[in-house]
Image: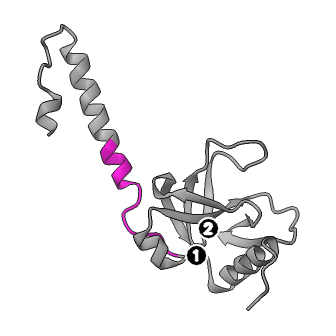
Amino acid sequence: MARRAFVGVGRDGNGELALISALTAALSRREDEKTVKRAPRRGDVYFVALDPAVGTEIRKTRPAVVISNDSCNTYGSRVIVLPVTRNVDSLYPGEARIQLRGVPGRVLGDQIRSIDKSRLRSRIGVISQDELLDVELAVQITLALRPS
Protein backbone atom coordinates (compact mmCIF):
# COMPACT_ATOMS: atom_id res chain seq x y z
CA MET A 1 0.00 0.00 0.00
CA ALA A 2 2.79 2.44 0.85
CA ARG A 3 4.32 1.54 -2.48
CA ARG A 4 1.34 2.98 -4.35
CA ALA A 5 1.80 6.32 -2.60
CA PHE A 6 5.15 6.69 -4.35
CA VAL A 7 4.00 5.71 -7.85
CA GLY A 8 4.46 8.68 -10.13
CA VAL A 9 6.98 10.43 -7.89
CA GLY A 10 9.27 12.45 -10.09
CA ARG A 11 7.00 12.52 -13.14
CA ASP A 12 5.48 15.93 -12.56
CA GLY A 13 8.61 17.85 -11.65
CA ASN A 14 7.45 17.99 -8.01
CA GLY A 15 8.60 14.49 -7.20
CA GLU A 16 10.70 15.58 -4.26
CA LEU A 17 7.81 17.55 -2.80
CA ALA A 18 5.44 14.61 -3.31
CA LEU A 19 7.90 12.23 -1.64
CA ILE A 20 8.34 14.57 1.35
CA SER A 21 4.58 14.98 1.61
CA ALA A 22 3.99 11.21 1.52
CA LEU A 23 6.69 10.55 4.13
CA THR A 24 5.34 13.29 6.39
CA ALA A 25 1.84 11.80 6.20
CA ALA A 26 3.17 8.32 7.00
CA LEU A 27 5.18 9.61 9.97
CA SER A 28 2.18 11.57 11.21
CA ARG A 29 0.04 8.42 11.17
CA ARG A 30 2.75 6.59 13.10
CA GLU A 31 2.93 9.35 15.70
CA ASP A 32 -0.87 9.25 16.14
CA GLU A 33 -0.66 5.50 16.72
CA LYS A 34 2.11 5.99 19.31
CA THR A 35 0.31 8.59 21.42
CA VAL A 36 -1.03 5.96 23.82
CA LYS A 37 1.02 2.79 24.27
CA ARG A 38 -1.26 1.14 26.80
CA ALA A 39 -4.87 1.60 27.74
CA PRO A 40 -5.33 4.45 30.19
CA ARG A 41 -6.58 3.48 33.63
CA ARG A 42 -8.99 5.19 35.99
CA GLY A 43 -6.97 7.67 38.05
CA ASP A 44 -4.19 8.07 35.47
CA VAL A 45 -3.19 11.63 34.64
CA TYR A 46 -2.30 12.46 31.03
CA PHE A 47 -1.47 15.57 29.11
CA VAL A 48 -4.59 16.03 26.96
CA ALA A 49 -5.02 18.24 23.89
CA LEU A 50 -8.32 20.01 24.68
CA ASP A 51 -8.38 22.46 21.76
CA PRO A 52 -10.49 23.42 19.98
CA ALA A 53 -12.54 24.78 22.87
CA VAL A 54 -15.59 27.04 22.84
CA GLY A 55 -16.51 29.83 25.25
CA THR A 56 -15.42 29.15 28.82
CA GLU A 57 -14.36 25.54 28.17
CA ILE A 58 -10.86 24.86 29.39
CA ARG A 59 -8.37 24.98 26.54
CA LYS A 60 -4.80 24.11 25.57
CA THR A 61 -2.91 20.90 26.24
CA ARG A 62 -3.02 20.33 29.96
CA PRO A 63 -3.13 17.57 32.55
CA ALA A 64 -6.40 15.70 32.99
CA VAL A 65 -7.50 12.82 35.22
CA VAL A 66 -9.05 9.79 33.53
CA ILE A 67 -12.33 8.97 35.33
CA SER A 68 -13.96 6.48 32.95
CA ASN A 69 -13.96 2.83 34.00
CA ASP A 70 -11.11 0.55 32.97
CA SER A 71 -13.27 -1.62 30.71
CA CYS A 72 -14.29 1.42 28.64
CA ASN A 73 -10.71 2.66 28.73
CA THR A 74 -9.42 -0.63 27.34
CA TYR A 75 -12.01 -1.42 24.69
CA GLY A 76 -13.59 1.93 23.85
CA SER A 77 -12.31 4.61 21.51
CA ARG A 78 -13.01 7.40 24.00
CA VAL A 79 -12.16 8.16 27.63
CA ILE A 80 -13.77 10.55 30.09
CA VAL A 81 -11.42 13.07 31.68
CA LEU A 82 -11.45 15.99 34.09
CA PRO A 83 -8.94 18.79 33.41
CA VAL A 84 -6.50 19.91 36.09
CA THR A 85 -5.36 23.47 36.76
CA ARG A 86 -2.42 24.63 38.86
CA ASN A 87 -4.52 27.53 40.15
CA VAL A 88 -5.23 26.29 43.67
CA ASP A 89 -6.14 29.62 45.25
CA SER A 90 -9.72 28.44 45.69
CA LEU A 91 -11.62 25.18 45.90
CA TYR A 92 -15.29 25.09 44.97
CA PRO A 93 -17.80 22.29 45.50
CA GLY A 94 -17.39 19.98 42.56
CA GLU A 95 -13.60 20.33 42.56
CA ALA A 96 -10.83 18.27 44.18
CA ARG A 97 -7.23 18.93 45.15
CA ILE A 98 -4.49 16.60 43.97
CA GLN A 99 -0.70 16.48 43.77
CA LEU A 100 1.05 15.93 40.42
CA ARG A 101 4.75 15.21 40.79
CA GLY A 102 4.76 17.21 44.01
CA VAL A 103 2.90 20.17 42.46
CA PRO A 104 -0.58 20.97 43.80
CA GLY A 105 -3.42 20.94 41.32
CA ARG A 106 -7.18 21.38 41.26
CA VAL A 107 -9.41 18.96 39.33
CA LEU A 108 -12.29 20.78 37.64
CA GLY A 109 -15.35 18.59 38.10
CA ASP A 110 -17.55 20.91 36.03
CA GLN A 111 -15.35 20.49 32.92
CA ILE A 112 -16.11 16.81 32.24
CA ARG A 113 -15.01 15.83 28.73
CA SER A 114 -15.48 12.66 26.74
CA ILE A 115 -12.53 12.64 24.35
CA ASP A 116 -11.13 10.46 21.62
CA LYS A 117 -8.01 8.63 22.77
CA SER A 118 -6.03 10.42 20.05
CA ARG A 119 -6.21 13.55 22.26
CA LEU A 120 -4.17 11.78 24.95
CA ARG A 121 -0.51 12.73 24.89
CA SER A 122 2.01 11.56 27.48
CA ARG A 123 1.10 9.92 30.78
CA ILE A 124 2.17 12.03 33.75
CA GLY A 125 1.33 9.69 36.59
CA VAL A 126 -1.51 8.44 38.72
CA ILE A 127 -3.39 10.01 41.61
CA SER A 128 -3.72 8.30 45.00
CA GLN A 129 -6.82 6.34 46.02
CA ASP A 130 -7.77 9.12 48.48
CA GLU A 131 -7.45 11.70 45.71
CA LEU A 132 -9.55 9.52 43.39
CA LEU A 133 -12.27 9.37 46.06
CA ASP A 134 -12.18 13.18 46.27
CA VAL A 135 -12.48 13.39 42.47
CA GLU A 136 -15.43 10.97 42.53
CA LEU A 137 -17.12 13.12 45.18
CA ALA A 138 -16.51 16.21 43.02
CA VAL A 139 -18.29 14.50 40.09
CA GLN A 140 -21.18 13.44 42.34
CA ILE A 141 -21.61 17.03 43.48
CA THR A 142 -21.35 18.42 39.94
CA LEU A 143 -23.92 15.97 38.55
CA ALA A 144 -26.13 15.98 41.68
CA LEU A 145 -25.67 12.22 42.11
CA ARG A 146 -26.39 10.62 45.42
CA PRO A 147 -23.29 9.17 47.10
CA SER A 148 -23.23 5.39 47.27
Residue under numbered circle 2: 65
Q: Is residue 54 above or below residue 35?
A: above
Residue at image location 86% in from the left, 68% down from the top: 91
Residue in view at x 62 percent, y 41 percent: 52
Q: Secondary structure at mark 1?
A: loop
Task: Quickly name the residue at label 1.
Answer: 43
Within-10-Å neighbours for mark 2: few <14, some 14–19, many 20+: many
Q: Is residue 126 above or below residue 32?
A: below
Q: Quadrant of the N terminus?
A: top left
Q: Is residue 19 left or right of residue 52?
A: left
The span picked out in magenta is 29-41
Residue nearest the observer in this picture, 52 or 131: 52
Amino acid type of the residue that numbered disc 1 sits on in the rendered structure: Gly
Residue 20's label in the rendered image is none
Tag 2: residue type?
Val
What is the x, y in percent for residue 74? 42, 72
Q: Is residue 131 above or below residue 2?
A: below
Q: Answer with the quarter of the image where residue 110 lies.
A: bottom right
Q: Is residue 40 magenta?
A: yes
Q: Are marks 1 and 2 in contact (CB under 8 Å)?
A: yes
Q: Residue at x 11, y 34 (%)?
A: 3
Q: Position of residue 102 (x, y in %)?
A: 66, 69
Q: Position of residue 129 (x, y in %)?
A: 63, 85
Distance from label 1 to label 2 (Cα)? 6 Å
Give the answer, above or below, for where 129 lies relative to 48.
below
